[in-house]
């Protein structure tokens, strides 16, 4: 077992997911299957190999620091589940 | 032959000669959608009224004698993860079920600019995570060639729409095979361009270092025409390649003399349907007959690409999908406190497979496991890429199957995620290396289409188009007719 049900509960919290008991059981089983398959990678000697996060040789893409058109506020808020006074409204934080 | 059975270039020629109007073509497509859509379920949204308006606008411009793009007046559809201004963009997820983007994705804007008629938005695996389109939160899409089979995924709706004559062409997106696999299963042409060739601005992100948009069409000429309309540098996408796109129709020449094509032995490994392998070898023999040289080659790290992908893609997804928090757009559930709002929103808004990949990615990135999983996978990615770099020093293109099997049955793999992941074994290495690859139909096995995959070095879309076109012009096996009739 690579991952226990307790690990699954911990990872779910990190990912901000509530899981039912049935889901916890299912993910414990399927994630173990998948992580078991990942063991294949341990066969590969990666000593001295540089990681590739990105395939294109692009670095820090800049543009001129000029003001451009942006989304009008009413459009930016049009899809908000809750909005008030031109702001996104969320539950009490403090 | 009905209008909906024609290719884009055939329709374009008829429009140019004034033998048909865009309104007539569009009406024919809407009628076709009305006839078969309850069986195929390719669309999440059909935009009938807007489509007819766009068609009329194209007809008016044509009547005025304006110079028009070859795509003007042609009815097309987009996978539902490309933002369309004022038109719902759901990603086939409950999370975005009512999301109406306030802007167009660059590809949507470019097609609009070309005068294309938008018929609607196509069904997909939720957030592009899947290989069968069974992970749509709304309904599965069926394979038009055999309704008991899946269309492949995640761009299953986009492939099925082209195959069932419900759109003249579509755009799909491909993170690990999501254009090529459904193209193969549905008997259409699908191209995943080089990473950075087509702007990702307005494409809902799954795994940003792998995602790429590309055309799904009835033939190679259409593929080149559509790529012409969407390729090129875009300042709105910071990973867009800063170079001008060529005229891809210039590569539509039926000539592969002297071309060197490699057949990577690792792609013909155990688990492959021998009838599929035989067709790929037949395609190789055809290329030889036409003057190309085909030789077996080796990409030794191939078997490690799939496990590396299923660490890298979920890791990027877990980060990308953190934005669905119920605050700025999308679903919101619960309002007691922030954390419970986040958790309830995400638990109800995301489906099974999306949650699995968020968990997998979060685990691979979490403290204590980062080096063992994520960093290891990134190093293996380097080795996979180096295999390709090395082989492309000697060969122009590679030829492989697109999938080890033909379309599997609806429901067959849905309870076994690992087996489902293995469907992408022939397409995933290409995304890790950022290369362009084409799936082109090549015969059938038990009436289900087979696709062969051509892979090229970075920005060799032209060579892929030339090779695909040559094959198409020289064998009827590449011509899998779009499905006629009522699909009974």
Image: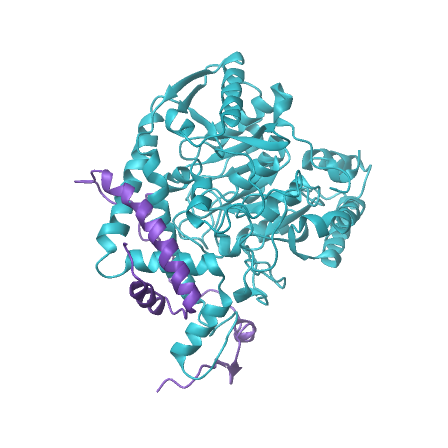
Chain colours: A purple, B cyan
Q: Is residue B69 visible?
A: no
Where is residue B353 drawn, in percent x and y? 46, 56
Whether residue A40 is situated above or below residue A8 in the rendered picture: above
Taking the image as drawn, is residue B145 in sight?
yes
Query: Nearest the camera: B321 or B356?
Result: B356
Rendering quarter of residue A12: bottom left
Quadrant position of the C terminus of chain A in the picture: bottom left
Q: In the rendering, at what x and y percent does residue B119 appear?
A: 69, 52
Q: In the image, A10: left or right of B100? A: left
Q: Nearer the viewer, residue B462 or B130?
A: B130
Residue at 36 percent of width and 45 percent of height: B309
Where is residue B248 shown, x and y percent of the image? 55, 33
Q: Quadrant of the N terminus of chain A?
A: bottom left
Question: Which residue is at the far left?
Answer: A48
Judge from the rendering whether residue B157 lies leftward or rightward of residue B429; answer left or right: right
Residue in the image at 45% along x and 74% along y: B344
User: Where residue B335 appears, x then y in whole percent?
Assistant: 47, 82
Q: Residue at x 50, y 74 (%)?
A: B332
Q: Is residue B431 left or right of residue B222?
A: left
Residue visible at 75% across and 46% down in the picture: B29
Please state the total of marks drawn on the protein image: 0
Q: Nearer the viewer, residue B310 or B54?
A: B310
């Amino acid at each position: 077992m690579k991952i226990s049900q307790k690990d699954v509960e911990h990872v779910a919290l990190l990912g901000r997911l509530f899981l039912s008991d049935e889901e916890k059981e299912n993910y414990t089983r399927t994630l173990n299957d998948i992580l078991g398959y990942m063991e294949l990678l341990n066969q590969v000697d990666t000593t001295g190999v540089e990681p590739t996060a990105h395939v294109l040789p692009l670095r820090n893409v800049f543009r001129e620091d000029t003001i451009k058109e942006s989304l009008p506020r009413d459009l930016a808020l049009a899809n908000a589940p809750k909005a008030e006074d031109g702001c996104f409204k969320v539950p009490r934080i403090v | 032959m009905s209008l909906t059975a024609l290719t884009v270039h055939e329709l374009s020629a008829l429009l140019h000669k004034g033998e048909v109007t865009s309104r007539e073509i569009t009406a024919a497509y809407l009628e076709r959608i009305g006839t078969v859509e309850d069986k195929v379920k390719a669309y999440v949204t059909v935009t009938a009224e807007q489509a007819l308006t766009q068609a009329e606008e194209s007809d008016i411009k044509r009547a005025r004698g304006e110079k028009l793009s070859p795509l003007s007046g042609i009815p097309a559809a987009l996978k539902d993860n490309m933002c369309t201004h004022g038109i719902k963009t759901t990603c086939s997820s409950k999370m975005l079920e009512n999301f109406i983007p306030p802007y167009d994705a660059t590809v949507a804007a470019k097609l609009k600019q070309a005068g294309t008629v938008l018929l609607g938005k196509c069904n997909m695996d939720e957030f592009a995570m899947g290989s069968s389109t069974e992970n749509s939160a709304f309904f599965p899409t069926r394979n038009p060639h055999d309704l008991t089979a899946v269309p492949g995924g995640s761009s299953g709706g986009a492939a099925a729409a082209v195959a069932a004559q419900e759109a003249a062409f579509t755009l799909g997106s491909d993170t690990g095979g999501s254009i090529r696999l459904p193209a193969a299963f549905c008997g259409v042409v699908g191209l995943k361009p080089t990473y950075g060739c087509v702007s990702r601005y307005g494409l809902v992100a799954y795994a940003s270092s792998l995602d790429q948009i590309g055309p799904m069409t009835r033939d190679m000429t259409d593929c080149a025409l559509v790529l012409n309309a969407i390729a090129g540098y875009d300042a709105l996408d910071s990973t867009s390649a800063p170079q001008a796109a060529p005229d891809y129709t210039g590569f539509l020449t039926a000539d592969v003399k002297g071309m060197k094509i490699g057949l990577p032995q690792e792609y013909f490994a155990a688990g492959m349907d021998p009838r599929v392998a035989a067709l790929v070898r037949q395609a190789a023999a055809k290329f030889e007959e036409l003057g190309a040289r085909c030789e077996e080659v080796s990409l030794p790290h191939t078997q490690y690409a799939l496990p590396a992908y299923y660490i890298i893609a979920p890791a990027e997804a877990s980060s990308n999908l953190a934005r669905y928090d119920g605050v700025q757009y999308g679903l919101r559930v619960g309002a007691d406190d922030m954390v419970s709002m986040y958790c309830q929103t995400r638990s109800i808004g995301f489906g099974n497979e999306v949650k699995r990949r968020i968990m997998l990615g979060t685990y691979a990135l979490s403290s204590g496991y980062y080096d063992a999983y994520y960093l290891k996978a990134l190093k293996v990615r380097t080795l996979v890429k180096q295999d390709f770099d090395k082989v492309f020093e000697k060969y122009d293109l590679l030829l492989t199957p697109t999938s080890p099997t033909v379309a599997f049955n609806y429901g067959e793999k849905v309870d076994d995620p690992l087996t489902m992941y293995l469907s992408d074994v022939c397409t995933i290495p290409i995304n890790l290396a950022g290369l362009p690859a084409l799936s082109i139909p090549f015969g059938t096995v038990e009436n289900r289409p087979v696709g062969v995959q051509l892979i090229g070095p970075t920005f060799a879309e032209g060579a892929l188009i030339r090779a695909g076109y040559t094959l198409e012009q020289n064998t009827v096996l590449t011509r899998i007719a779009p499905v006629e009739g009522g699909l009974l």
